[in-house]
Image (cartoon, helix red, strand yellow):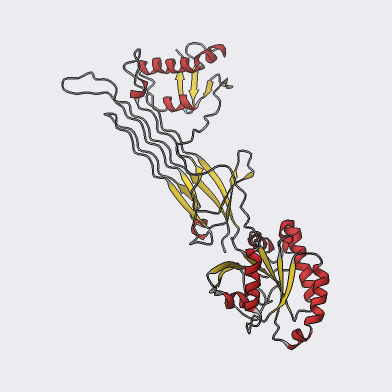
Amino acid sequence: MIDTVRLNINAGSGGNGCSSFLREKYRPKGGPNGGDGGDGGNAYLIGDSSINTLLHIKFNSTIYVVHGGHGKGKNKRGGNGDDKYIPVPMGTVVYRMNEDGEKEYLDDITSTSPRLVAVGGRGGWGNTRFATATNQEPVLAQRGEKGEKSILYLELKLLADVGLLAKPNAGKSTLISMCSAAKAKVADYPFTTVEPVLGVVRIGDNDFVMMEVPGLLEGAHDGIGLGHEFLRHAERARLYVHMLDGISEDPVEDYRMINQELEQFNPEMAEKAQLVVVNKLDVTEVREAQEELTERLQEAIGDKRSSIQFISAATGEGVDALMGNIFAALAAMPKEEPEEGPELEPMRFRPQRSSGPETVHKDRHGVYVVESEMMERLTAMADPRDQRVLLQLWREMRKTGLADRLIDAGIEAGDVIRFGKVELAWF
């Protein structure tokens, strides 16, 4: 079962703005008419109840969203890139790699509401946007903003009402096959079940989801027997059915061992309500030992919220009563609301991405390096051989205060300035 995935998402970049001027038969020197670039597509995760593993993205883990179209003349705006919706199973926990290289909790996908995980870049401005009363021939246009890149870690924790826990070969698969439509593999050897199995149990007009967790061994909290993978899926269950093998050497010790593993993996799991079920009542030795085994189990359970019931999953004896008890226990329990992450509901407006601070410094080669996203987007499409371009770049730097900061840093005529990958001579 594929239940963990690293996902690399590249949101769409914005289209470039256009630098264009109106040229018609009787208007040979018309004004600027370059259109803006379109916005790049966003990336969303969306819960999908029809899938229950992450296999569909395991081997397609790098996702590219559509870029925005470039602007054109006659004030034609480029088209927006289509958003990308990535379906994931319900119960998928999402972590994002932050700037420090550490994973941080982002969201918990428990509904079909799209969750924004990567923002597309805004389209660049066409030269029409730069026209003013004192600049009637703007030649500058912006490069589109780059789309956001996100590294996500997805971890699936299946959603179920009831978790069926036991040591290997205790009869869990037989029980879930009998009371639901789940086709669990049944055989007379340990670890027949190697991945969680979900089944829907119907009682009249009501139903609940039962999950069979593969058999647990001592040391499961440390990963023995793939314990981490198994126990993680049991975290979401509201109620545990703790199944014991009636012909085990010591069912009471098995009960203690499983609860110790729950406690050491996640203490909250050990505090959840349990129904203790002893299986294989059809075996004579188990039927004769009911009274003694009940007394020993009651002593081991103590004051925990647990009841004891004997069944035979093979013959069906006691199974209907068990299903009724499970439904009654669930009905008496409030549904737990999942922890909410940051607000990631679908956007009414495109979010503003922070551009970062503008900085100026001189490197060891004597080049003045300007870190400014706005200037990088302007110079990326500028022709430095055109004196109009240089003059308009100077005006933009005066507006933002970058020109004054360069002068304060000691820049002189002829010195080289670097904006991203573009170098210009100061004039």
Residue 76 drawn above or below residue 394: below
Q: How many marks?
A: 0
Front residue of 112 and 61: 112
> In which quadrant of the rendered image does the N terminus lie?
bottom right
| Residue 241 appears in the figure | yes
| Residue ID at (53%, 31%) | 354
Residue 25: % across, % down: 16, 22
Residue 410 appears left or right of 41: right
Place residue 100 in its image quadrant: top right
Relative image position of residue 87 (x, y in whole percent) = 48, 54
Where 366 sits versus 119, above or below?
above
Res 237 quadrant in image: bottom right
In the orientation shown, which residue stands out farthest toward the left? 25
Q: Quadrant of the C terminus?
A: top left
Task: Write the residue at 51% across / 41% down.
Answer: 149
Work out whether residue 381 or residue 355 is closer to the camera in this orientation and state it.
355
> x and y percent of residue 236 in the render?
63, 59
Relative to 235, residue 183 above or below: below
Q: Determine which quarter of the picture holds residue 121.
A: top left
Please state if 400 lies on the left or on the right of 210 as rendered.
Answer: left
Q: Is residue 411 above or below residue 271?
A: above
Residue 212 shows in this picture: no
Q: Give the left or right position of residue 409, taking residue 297 as reference.
A: left
